[in-house]
Image (cartoon, coloured by chain):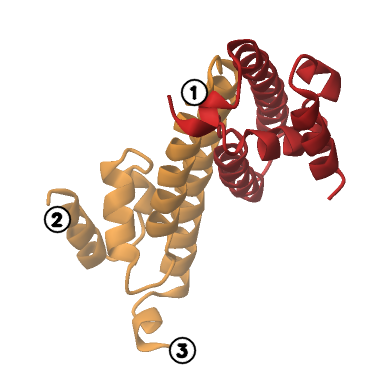
Chain colours: A red, B orange
Amino acid sequence: VDPQEANWSPTEQEIAKQAFDAAYERDLLTLTRTLQSRSSAIATAEDIWNLHDFLSAKRHEFDGRYDFRYPSLLFVFAELIKTNLLQISELKGLAEEKLAKISALTRI
Amino acid sequence: VDPQEANWSPTEQEIAKQAFDAAYERDLLTLTRTLQSRSSAIATAEDIWNLHDFLSAKRHEFDGRYDFRYPSLLFVFAELIKTNLLQISELKGLAEEKLAKISALTRI
């Protein structure tokens, strides 16, 4: 067991995984709908290349955002809360200390 | 007038522009429909990133393919014919020498 992971009890790990997955699914659903709506409205070549630029940015954003490693997780959750992909209430059950750190990070 | 352009009579320039634009519009229409159909079938994140890769490749392809400069034009038309975006008959009216060169290039 890596020492960072040891900081998270099995219950906490489960809560974290569920919250993480829920945020990811929401993000993906929004992206899918945006793609579908932008695709159906394509009228010019410019619209296509703008959509490509948008997807490039989103891919970069997803790559940076969804990093399920215990050392990063408090930052990840803070970011997901700031971007409205997660409610702090979905993390109920994590140690108070972790919740306090996440809350503090959302205010930065 | 640049010396390469001087090789193309005004009528040839007009024929070339029309054929070029027609191929471009066909290509764009196909791309738009593919995008719409792939977007509407998105089921997983992988589908989205594959679509992004596909768009990156298409953008690169378009950038290379649609180069309306007289020195490149014979190559451009040969490529458009090879990829079924243009019929040689749409270039009727160009000098025989140009048509022969384009035909030869399509067989390379």
Rounded to the nearest angstrom, the CA distance separating label 1 from label 2 is: 40 Å
Bin the neighbour count of mark 1 within 10 Å (Cα to Cα): few under 14, some 14-19, many 20 and up: some
Residue A56: x %, y % from top left: 56, 45
Which residue is label 2 attached to?
B104
- Which amino acid, by three-letter code, is at mark 1? Asp
Same chain check for tags 1 and 2 = yes
Which comes sooner in the sequence, label 3 or label 2?
Answer: 3
Location of residue A80 (image quadrant): top right
Seen from the viewer's position, the closer of residues B91 and B102 is B102
Chain letter, disc 2 residue: B
Seen from the viewer's position, the closer of residues A47 and A83 is A83
In front: mark 1 or mark 2? 1
Q: Does residue A21 appear to the left or right of B49 in the view shown?
A: right
Residue A83 visible, this orientation: no
For the residue labelled by badge 1, is the local secondary structure a helix, a strand or a loop? helix
For the residue labelled by badge 2, is the local secondary structure a helix, a strand or a loop? helix
Q: Does residue B71 appear to the left or right of B9 in the view shown?
A: left
Residue B33: x %, y % from top left: 55, 27
- Which amino acid, by three-letter code, is at mark 3? Val
Which residue is label 3 attached to?
B1
Chain letter, disc 1 residue: B
Mark 1 vs 2: CB contact within 8 A: no
